Image (spheres, rainbow, N blue to C red):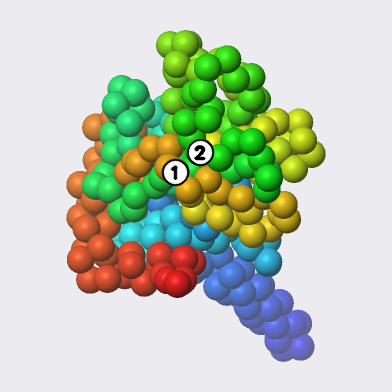
Amino acid sequence: MKKFTKVIAVVLSIAAIIAIFAACSGGNGKEKAKLTLATSADFPPYEFVGDNGDYVGIDIEIAQAIADKLDRELVVENMDFDSIVGAVSTGKTDIGMAGLTDTPERRESVDFSSSYATGIQAVIVKEGSAIKTVDDLYADGVTYKVGAQISTTGDIYFGDDIKAKKTTCTLEEYQSGADAVAALSAGKIDAVIIDNEPAKSFVAANSGLKILDTEYTNEDYAIAFPKNSALLEDVNKALEELIADGTVQKIVDKYIPAK
Ligand code: ARG
């Protein structure tokens, strides 16, 4: 009889251990579908690394709200900006959000959602710079060095203008906007072309810099998908609902307080 009790005790403890493991691994075996997001968390206030080391920003919160609506688990895949369109077009991730401008060239490899924000390409210079307006970058014979994050629209447009001989400036490409801004602060380059909101963040975080009053271009931010993605319709519907019910505006206001 004693032996029998021992056997029961062992069986019960094994059962308890199995139960604990099952509970820890989610138990019912039904895992939520994932929504994988390619982003480049170097672009405040749209995406950046928060104080706790987590990914935060307007795009991350909009993506989270979309994932919630679709009952999916948002998984953020952080990468260099110039890898995003490739990651999305090859289906490595479900979507891409990175303050990403909807352009005809990118539409050759990815599809885009409705636009959820507008971006402006701005020019950052050092305080006291001889560059006073965007036109100064296009003046006869100037040899300013202009920096931009590689593969961004600022980089592409200015590179095109150099090729078309519209400007005699030169272009320096950096892996991140912060790297370009650091080069500007160090006096290695004369200007940085970057989207207006990150420009404001970088200027606020680094003394001695300012944003030119004139704008370089205006563009639309949208969510990128692999071509013919089955998710596009659902994500776009969720996004449009979030725009219509004011959720997107609330998220934007949280990160870009109105003055
Ligand atoms: N709007 C620009 C573009 O699409 C810049 C975006 C850069 N985004 C980033 N997360 N670094 O090219």
Who comes first in sequence, dot 2 or dot 1? Answer: 2
- Residue 86 appears at what percent x and percent y? 46, 27
Task: Please indicate, yes or no, whether residue 77 appears anywhere in the rendered image.
Answer: no
Residue lying furthest right in this view? 186
- Residue shown at 51% from the left, 22% from the top: 139
Q: Name the residue beneath numbered marker 2.
A: 133
For image coordinates 61% across by 50% down, the residue present is 210
- Where residue 84 appears, as percent x and y from the top left, is 49, 35
Amino acid type for the residue under numbered disc 1: Thr
Quarter occupied by the C terminus: bottom left
Q: Residue 71 placed where, x, y %?
A: 33, 63
Task: Describe the element under mark 2 as helix, strand or loop.
Answer: loop
User: Seen in the image, is 141 located left or right of residue 229?
Assistant: right
Residue labelled with disc 1? 214
Note whether 141 is above or below 204 in the view shown.
above
Q: Residue at x 43, y 37 (%)?
A: 216
Q: Nearer the viewer, residue 84 or 17?
A: 84
Quadrant in the rendering for residue 9: bottom right
How many marks overall?
2
Q: Give the spatial CA distance, label 2 vs label 1.
A: 6 Å
